[in-house]
Amino acid sequence: MVLPTFAPVPELDPDAYERMARDVRTLLGIDLTQYKPAQVWRRVNGFATAKGLPDADALVAKATQDAVLRQAFLDMLTINVSEFFRNPEAWDALVAQYLKPILLRQLSVRIWSAGCSLGYEPLTIAMLAREIAPHTPVYILATDLDDTILSRARKATYTEPQMAGVSPSRRAHFFRKVDTGWEARPELQALITWRRHDVLRDPYEHPFDIICCRNVVIYFTEQAKVELYKRFCDALRPGGVLFLGATESIPNVRAVGLQPSGLTFYRRP
């Protein structure tokens, strides 16, 4: 989850933050107690200011009555800033070290894109899987907290600027031109199962060969991250791999049951 930065706002007010967290959970179903308070406080108040409201309390009160504002508030808290093949060198490493060997060795493969946002990541995985092993059964679970973002992802339609990371040959093979831009071909979409899911609260499906959770947890508290990584470990097959963002790491990795396996990769022993 990457939240936009706005103008300076007042320092964190613990009582007001606790009140806001309670109201946000009731209004949006998001548990802010698992997020870093100072960062969330700054961004929520900045968002309120951008909407012409004096503070978080006013934002919550208005969002309760205004469905459009409520959805914008949810999008601000949950949307991932992403793109196709984000950090290409990391995807090259995933293919060479993990995805290709797994696809060529196993009869079927299970992959989870946790925090899939608009669908760039699961579709990137689907393209790579079909390039490596055109006929191997592949199950890609794509989850996100925001139903509105998921509904857009399910359409698998992208504008020309959004397609910047997709080469001409991949566009020709995996997409078709439509009025609004480009649409992923049905055979690519068929590999993906879309589902609303809160990684902090909901049960996890398992087992997976690869779990991708990139640039999603940067605003979580350290304790929430520890619990999350433990659950990811449990959801992986023995030998399965967790794929994080380029700037993310797990400091005490063995405490969560994983072991380092190259930059941004962690393996379940």
Image (cartoon, grey):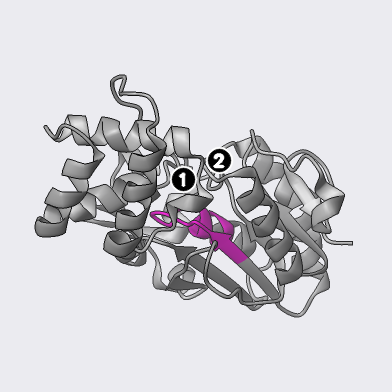
Residue 76 position in % (x across, y down): 31, 44
Question: Which type of secondary structure does the marked residue at label 1 adopt?
Answer: loop
Give the answer, above or below, for where 254 lies relative to 194: above
Q: Residue at x 69, y 65 (%)?
A: 231
Quadrant of the rendered image containing residue 256? bottom right
Question: Which type of secondary structure does the marked residue at label 2 adopt?
Answer: loop
Instruction: Name the disc covering residue 218, or none.
Output: 2
Q: Earlier in the sequence, mark 1 or mark 2?
A: 1
Question: Could you say which is closer to the camera, residue 91 or residue 212?
Answer: 212
Q: Residue at x 30, y 50 (%)?
A: 75
| Residue at the extreme top of the image, as rendered | 8
Residue 215 position in % (x across, y down): 55, 43
Residue 151 position in % (x across, y down): 30, 66
| Residue at the extreme front of the image, as rendered | 15
Amino acid type assigned to the residue bearing label 1 in the image: Met
Q: Residues within 10 Å of mark 2 (few under 14, many from 20)?
A: some
Q: Report whether residue 269 is seen.
A: yes
| Residue at the extreme right of the image, as rendered | 269
Give the answer, above or below, for where 57 lies relative to 235: above
Quadrant of the rendered image containing residue 131? bottom right
Judge whether residue 43 is colored magenta: no
Q: Residue at x 64, y 33 (%)?
A: 247
Q: Residue at x 83, y 59 (%)?
A: 257
Instruction: Name the disc covering residue 1, or none.
Output: 1
Left or right side of 21 for 218: right
Q: Report whether residue 157 is seen.
A: no
Q: Distance of mark 1 from mark 2, alpha carbons?
A: 7 Å
Mark 1 and mark 2 residues within 8 Å of each other at the beta carbon: yes
The residues colored magenta run 112-126
Indicate the quadrant containing the C terminus: top left, top right, bottom left or bottom right.
Answer: bottom right
